[in-house]
Image (spheres, rainbow, N blue to C red):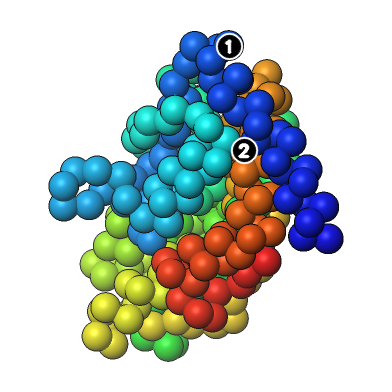
Amino acid sequence: MKKLILSTALIALTSGAAFAESHGMTVRMGTEGAYPPYNFINDAGEVDGFERELGDELCARAELTCEWVTNDWDSIIPNLVSGNYDTIIAGMSITAERDEVIDFTQDYYPPTASAYVALTDGADYMGGVVSAQTATIQAAHIAESGATLLEYATPDETIAAVRNGEADAVFADYDYLAPIVEASGGELMFVGDRVPLGGGVGMGLRESDAELRDKFNAAIDSMKADGSLNALLAKWFGEGVATY
């Protein structure tokens, strides 16, 4: 099976250079730069994290010239559609609602869980005030629950809302929250059960860019087949992370 995947991927990847040459373009990789360990800005002022390393490798395998662009999360889809960059690679879960507006590659991060974090284990995360980042699957989930949704533009603000008492809990990706809880020294803690949401994380593209989508799909296929994607997942999220 792996040989079949690799053969199919190689056929698509060999046309990557021709694609870039014929289009005369640099592929602009759009990310948020504020959602570690998926993506963040390092001390040198550069995009870093799991998706930076993954994106660079995908571009290399697809023989595409790529550059990185940052954009606030709440306008990340509109600015893709309007042409400010060519992909979204920003911890974006694949959902039916988003797929009506943009296209997605296959997932490069398996479907994962979201979780609640609070200051005390008695926090009312089911019926109280819960913070979440705007325009996320977590915010949509809270809006349909019995809790009161408090939306913020950045993930940092959702954590601050819990610390300053504006929210009883924050609801976000477990893998985003885990290092924050660990670094808090016991100030923050997980409460309740994890909640499975979304269809995995994929790259977003304009619906008109099917050829570019196919190049990235082939590159993702090749990384899944040779184990390098699993190695990256373990590097950035720990040995217990879901893999392919």
Secondary structure state at the residue bearing disc 2: helix
Secondary structure state at the residue bearing disc 1: helix
Residue beneath label 1, please? 22
Confirm or deny contact between disc 1 and disc 2 (CB under 8 A): no
Judged left or right of residue 120, residue 141 is right
- Residue plotted at (69% across, 50% down): 221
Q: Position of residue 166 (x, y in %)?
A: 31, 63
Judged left or right of residue 13, residue 48 is left
Q: Position of residue 41 (x, y in %)?
A: 26, 48
Q: Nearer the viewer, residue 221 or 190?
A: 221
Q: Earlier in the sequence, mark 1 or mark 2?
A: 1
Q: Nearer the viewer, residue 207 or 218?
A: 218
**Which mark is on residue 216?**
2
- Residue plotted at (44% across, 87% down): 122
Q: Position of residue 124 (x, y in %)?
A: 48, 77
- Residue 121 drawn above or below residue 169: below
Q: Position of residue 108 (x, y in %)?
A: 61, 53
Judged left or right of residue 213, residue 62 is left
Question: Residue 81 sits in which quadrant?
Answer: top right
Three-letter amino acid code at the position of disc 1: Ser
Question: Residue 98 sits in which quadrant?
Answer: top right
